[in-house]
Amino acid sequence: MNSTLYQAWLQYAPIKDEELAAVYSRLLGTVVADLQQSRVANAAIQELRNACRSMLGIVPSITSEVRASSYFEVRIHAADAEEGTEEIGEDSMGAGRVRLGAEGFRLEHRGHGQQEKLILTGGSGKGVLYGVFHLLRLLASHQPLTGLNITEQPVNGLRMINQWDNADGSVERGYSGHSIFYENGRFTENWDRVRDYARLLASVGLNAISINNVNVHEIETKFITAEYLPTIAQLADIFREYGITLYLSINFAAPLHIGGVPTSDPLNEEVRQWWKDTADEIYDHIPDFGGFVVKADSEHRPGPFAYGRDHADGANMLAEALEPHGGLVIWRCFVYNCMQDWRDRSTDRARAAYDHFTPLDGRFKDNVLLQIKNGPMDFQVREPVSPLFGSMKETNQVLEFQIAQEYTGQQRHVCYLVPQWKEVLDFDTYANGTGSEVKKIVDGSLHGMKYSGIAAVSNIGKDENWTGHTLAQANLYGFGRLVWNPDMSAEGIAEEWTRLTFGNDETEVAVVCGMLMRSWPIYESYTSPLGVGWMITPHTHYGPDVDGYEYSRWGTYHFADRDGIGVDRTVATGTGYTAQYFEPNAARYDSLEDCPDELLLFFHHVPYSHVLKSGKTVIQHIYDTHFEGAEAAAGLLKAWTSLAGKVDLERLTQVTERLADQAEHAKHWRDVINTYFYRKSGVPDAQGRTIY
Ligand code: GCW
């Protein structure tokens, strides 16, 4: 496929500015490279050549000796095997000596006139790969190369994508068509698309992927056996070429289901041996296999609880099997009681992960990482940061985001999530006093952890544009860039993506970036007020249904009645959840006066007449935001259609259709929510607008 939809941010559009193209062509026409047989570096050079053909109409020649007067030199720094760090000499700007990790790169421009050269030094083949993609970003956004002197290293070690793809070809919470990996119970035969996916992931610095759903069904349970491993090894090979390590989600009850062992008890010797033998077999096929992702004792999945064991017992058993091979166990903390009785006000889903896992701190083996969703509930439009971050000082932690827009409009609504993710990463947990932001916990620096990082549920599928909504590509792009460097700004990432995806027309860049930056607040305003969450249709999680979950068995409540709304999670009168935070967060959330408006209903139950910091009552806030939100959604459509003539027809039409649907659906949200609260509370809108 070759459409603009398909190319996503790797458009490599021809550079029409002749002067600029000439400078780029002079520098990149000859590549001087000694790639030491690195497949990854070779893939990078291949990418460079294709990109240059497309952008500049030249195919760089490759030589091992310097011949041309201007050239692009690519080096892999020799001793990259030695612990991944190496001195690489004097910084040409005189900034001193710089250490380059295995995944880092340095890109510098030297000389002038006909004697210019560009030098890329990678700490390994992967460093070269990331450096080439960085260079291509500069080209595609028409940046000057003169004087370039940068060194970049990824901040997070594990930069992972989780596919929730099933062997039958469906994707759990997938909004972009079927799986690119599977169809009808088998692996797809044509893997070109997987290779292009690997390119997309590598281009933003991602380095790990788990290829099957954390809910592991019958066929996928057998992925760890000789029946499937040869095929999976071929997939691993595709990803390996782009610096991406392959992981599998496993079924905790596999020994029982497919191993011929009468139990899956993690302390049973036969079970432990079975996992060791299984690990040996996996590594025979895939020597650099990453490890296992595990959802256990969660939403009816099997786990150690069935045998009276805890999660450390379960995770450590798997860790022991993977340890001799250098594999990791990524153990998810999404463990809660999903059958809560509404009469029981002490059970609180928000508390669950913390309550289950903090007592286990210090008991996990070194190669276990706990994967924690960003919030305590489940990827809501707005929720506080999970109090587990920072609470386990002796346990490796991985943060889990969801790029798939399960609760944020399902890629039918535009909702750029990078600003939300940044709020999470910048949140100060105070775990070690001021300056204990989540980003420092998940990059491993705060508690000096051996393994750490960030993972996210993918949003791609077989749709031609990968992500259903073309603008949802920005979330996949943004996830990679943010995880590479959490200090990048959401605006900066949006701008990069827009330039690479749509080109450098300044009006277009401004319009698209503006839309992206407004999109999450807009979505929030016509859906869920003040952090309350869960007012969506049960199971599908699309569209409003205020009481859908309130009166279901799943136990996630807003407690709205005729007098008020919100969940009391305070210590004195509520579930006590606020106490799971470090001070001063605990006190701030616990206090009705200090709790920030946007999370008020997450932490407190208040009457509709309660006055917010904004000066409005809760009920008036609900009405106002819903009216304004629906209008703003219509504004997104208007902004986009102003780009007619600038954006190619394919993408113009695709996005227009989605935005038109969004504008309609936003009105539906507005009306359902407003009428619900009007009829519950009996309080009219101060502005007398139409509420049904
Ligand atoms: O939010 C829930 C989703 C489930 C998902 C689960 C999880 C994969 O609705 O579809 O299952 O989270 O994260 O395990």
Image (tube, helix red, strand yellow):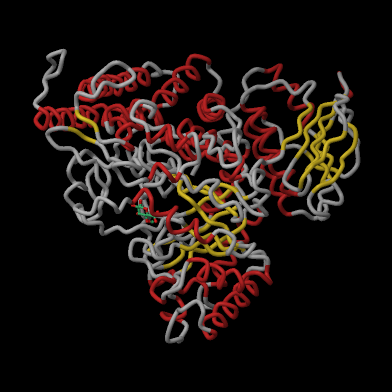
Residue 260 to residue 423: above or below: below
Judge left or right: residue 114 versus residue 611. right
Nearer the observer, 76 or 180: 76
Nearer the observer, 139 or 594: 594
The residue at 42%/44% (across/down) is 579
**Which quarter is ligand 1 in?**
bottom left
Judge left or right: residue 270 versus residue 322. left
The residue at 35%/26% (across/down) is 593
- Residue 395 image position (x, y, % from top left): 59, 56
How many labels, in total?
A: 0
Nearer the observer, 426 or 505: 426
Query: What quarter of the picture does the C terminus occupy?
Result: top left
- Residue 431 image position (x, y, % from top left): 57, 42
- The answer, for residue 84, to whether it is visible in the render is yes
The residue at 50%/70% (across/down) is 314
Image-quadrant location for residue 619: top left
- The answer, for residue 204, to whether it is visible in the render is no
- Residue 99 image position (x, y, % from top left): 82, 40
Residue 661 to residue 400: above or below: above
- Residue 410 image position (x, y, % from top left): 33, 41
Nearer the observer, 340 or 663: 340
Image-quadrant location for residue 231: bottom right
